[in-house]
Image: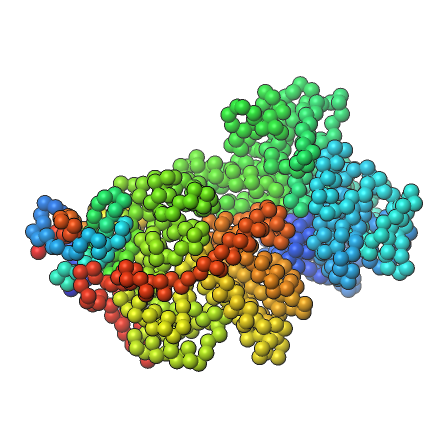
Amino acid sequence: MDIKELNTQAAVSFDNVKIWYKAAAVDKFPINGGACVLYKGKQIAVFNFTRQGSWYACQNLCPHKMEMVLSRGMIGQDGEHPKVACPLHKSTFSLKTGENLNGDLNAITTYPVKIEDNFVYIGFLE
Amino acid sequence: MKTVVVIGNGMVGYKFCEKFVAKNENKAFNLLVFGEEPRVAYDRVHLSEYFENGDAEKLCLAPRSWYDERGIQLYTNQRITEINRTEQSVTTNKGEVYNYDYLVIATGSSPFVPAIKGVDKKGVFVYRTIEDLEETMQYASDIKGGKAAVLGGGLLGLEAAKAVKDMGLEPHVVEFAPRLMPRQLDHDGSTALEQKMRELGIHVHLNKATQQILGNGRIEGMEFSEGDSLQVQMLIISAGIRPRDELAKSCDLKTGDRGGIVVDKRMRTSDPRIFAIGEVALYKDMIYGLVAPGYEMAQVAVDQILGRETLMSETIDMSTKLKLIGVDVASFGNPFTSEEEAHSIIFENKLQGLYKRINISKDGKTLLGGILVGDASDYNMLLQLQQNKMALPENPEDLILGARGGEGAALGNVMDLPDEAVVCSCESVSKGVICSAVTEDGHESLKSVCKSTKAATGCGGCKPMVVDLVNESLKSLGKTVKESICEHFNYSRRELYDIVKLRGIETYDELLDLVGTGDGCEVCKPAVAAIFASVYNETANRQETIQDSNDRYLANIQRNGTYSVVPRVAGGEISPKQLIALGRIGMKYDLYTKITGGQRIDMFGAQLHELPLIWEELIQEGFESGHAYGKALRTVKSCVGSTWCRYGMDESVSFAIEIENRYKGIRSPHKMKGGVSGCIRECAEARCKDFGFIAVEGGWNVYVCGNGGANPKHAELLAEKVDKETAVKYVDRFLMYYIKTAAPLTRTAAWLEKLEGGITYLKNVVIHDSLGIAKELDEEMQRYADTYKCEWKEAVETPEIRARYTHFVNSDEPDSNIEFVPMRGQKMPKAWTQ
């Protein structure tokens, strides 16, 4: 998979989802933490934000040094944004909009998540 | 080019140079400085600190290179023996002659030694230079445990008594007057101080006129006028100063009847080409033995030479504040007003050893002066009220009692001071200058404000006020200065530590619900994780998602998202069999290996899913976690010690292994490193560590709070020649106290720097149990040692934890993006492209 392609991909929203991919059971994801899902060669970081009762998904690639690590980052909250902090250099990204909150890196791609029958589904365009 | 010659390289002489080069912009003058001491100018005010750390460099005001870089010709160890006013020249003790256009005499003073019979006996010293101190220390080490007296109960005498106590002798202060610090304190103030001194083991003898020094060749005692005597083996004379005006006398400059070179308000002597500044200058019939007036004189002389009409203040502020072994003493304005000129309000609490007196003008409008003993925290504000003749609160007693029942502090806000109020008297820095350094010049930290304005760089007494001013100014710009750890907790780490401990909180969410707001972040989560680890000694496995990157997977994340593995090799001792095991495992998983700075072996390039496999094998070979990933004890480095080394004084390896095993696994505000050296050659670099032990004749020296890294700092001496058990006990307490009180990600050196009272305070807590918490600290550290478990063993053996080590949650494939390239027969991550 080409890294640049993933990095410039348009964000997927609930409205334009074509495919809901059934990723894994809810209990495979740590409480208030993330794990990485593999879908058609793409690495997707999925976060179980238990404290807010919500789920988020984004690219696993940190645009700072182009490493596949975001799923291992700590999550938290910055004002109205739920966020993830990259484990390498603590760049933080909004899990809602994908924007870099503490710098001017490119925004990351985000994906919609839904839970059905205790399974986590991620929305893709293809 | 004109030449200015300065005689004397003491504090005031140095200050003259500093101010002169700052203003001599067009370099129209040569500056020549002669000092008779071998050292460059040092801080005599804090001389007693030399006893604590033995580090003369710390006292140094500026290194030799400072003078060189500014084109100042500095001649130390050279005394001027003659001034020839007609030739405008000076002659050194080496016979060399130098011409001057202007001459500045800053020869200071010498200790006054009264003509007491037997004062020339061995064991009688004065207290003025580092050399005096070294001689005194040398002598003191021969009479260990003996008694020593200080003649003179003034400011300097009490400092000397503290030094005597630090040298391990029983201190006795002998004062002729009926009270201590007679120039600063009244009778009741002295009584309060005396009580404090006695509690601290300093014996005080007042109303004593010393008749003669007893002893055959060396001092054995002192005999007083009423026939009574005191047995002592050493005596330090601190009975006042005499100006060093002999040069002035020999060239017929006008001097006072009781010494001192007469100067006018331009600091000129009777010869207009010659200035006198500091303790040698007699201004308005007085000699001023304080730093602040000396510095002001230096400024006046600089300006006069450079053609500016600056004049010396009409009245000289003799206010002083000092801390003696933790006892505050302050005196300001006119401390001794009579009943005719003022009303005095006096507060006394004998139980706590507090005495406060303020003198209010008859009309009740202004503060004239006062005395504070036991608690001088309000000194700076009171001094400002007095100096600026500011309006007093309706009930002036609130100034020393605090506002009772009402809102807010009686002293008001520092920001209420007028802009011209002088906050730092040593450097004459006003409130306006400090505030505008923040608001106009954009300085945002205390350090940079102090550096640019020079405020709080003298005696440091004004520092709390400068802190307040900087913080308030920052606030006025809308910048926050709170100590809270992040937006989710309005508490410092220390406060959160207490909350967790006292309320028995066990999870991050519970703490956030109870005292926090929002959903947390990458700052507070690991900070709180470290607190749980410290309070409950729990491993990073229990609440893995609040752990920092490395703690979450018990490994150090590297450039490409792979991890490194570092097993513990306590003390750096490793058997050939263990080396082979590490080699075998390294080859099996194709790991890059390197020896670390902490005497162990780091294995790089492990993928997430490989970590439990690697550790399973390591554990089978008898290894355990090295905690290289945690804010925890890393290593205790050792030299080979007396088992092999022909110089070794003790078994450094055995001790290092013992201590590394004692502290392993403990989580702390930052990483901690230790070192043990078997002799003073210090091959283990123990003084660059957070704690270090060095074997010396008769025991171990214990050092704390050093580090390498970005700001290298040598560790400071905590205890000398103690046995191993005592050494461990002290370090137990030190580490525990650090763990409980430091801010997140603060190494011990930075923590000590911020600890008020510094190493002396730390010694008091650790050695003398001044806070009464030693037992608690001992027990907590022992509990850590007793409840240690290897978290990697726990992770490998617990299926739920082990399941975390997979890159994909929905696939067993490894991460295909990780790429390595070869390097010198091993591998390395493919370099970052940006």
- In this view, the residue in front, B88 or B373, is B373
Measured from the top left, where is residue B280 in percent x and y?
76, 46
Q: Is residue B599 left or right of residue B62?
A: left
Measured from the top left, where is residue B826 in percent x and y?
32, 77
| Residue B786 visible in rendering | yes
- In this view, the residue in front, B148 or B199, is B199
| Residue B3 visible in rendering | no
Would you identify the image quadrant in which residue B818 lies? bottom left
| Quarter containing the N terminus of chain B | bottom right
| Quarter containing the C terminus of chain B | bottom left
Q: Which residue sits at x=37%, y=39%? A: B514
Measured from the top left, where is residue B651 in percent x and y?
58, 72
- In this view, the residue in front, B4 or B587, is B587
Q: Which residue sits at x=52%, y=57%? A: B782
Q: Which residue sits at x=60%, y=21%? A: B395
Would you identify the image quadrant in which residue B330 lies? top right
Note whether B250 is above or below B288 in the view shown: below
Question: How is the protein colored in the picture?
Answer: rainbow
Measured from the top left, where is residue B513 in percent x and y?
34, 40
Note whether B392 is above or below B263 in the view shown: above
Q: Which residue sits at x=63%, y=25%? A: B397
- In this view, the residue in front, A122 or B469, is A122
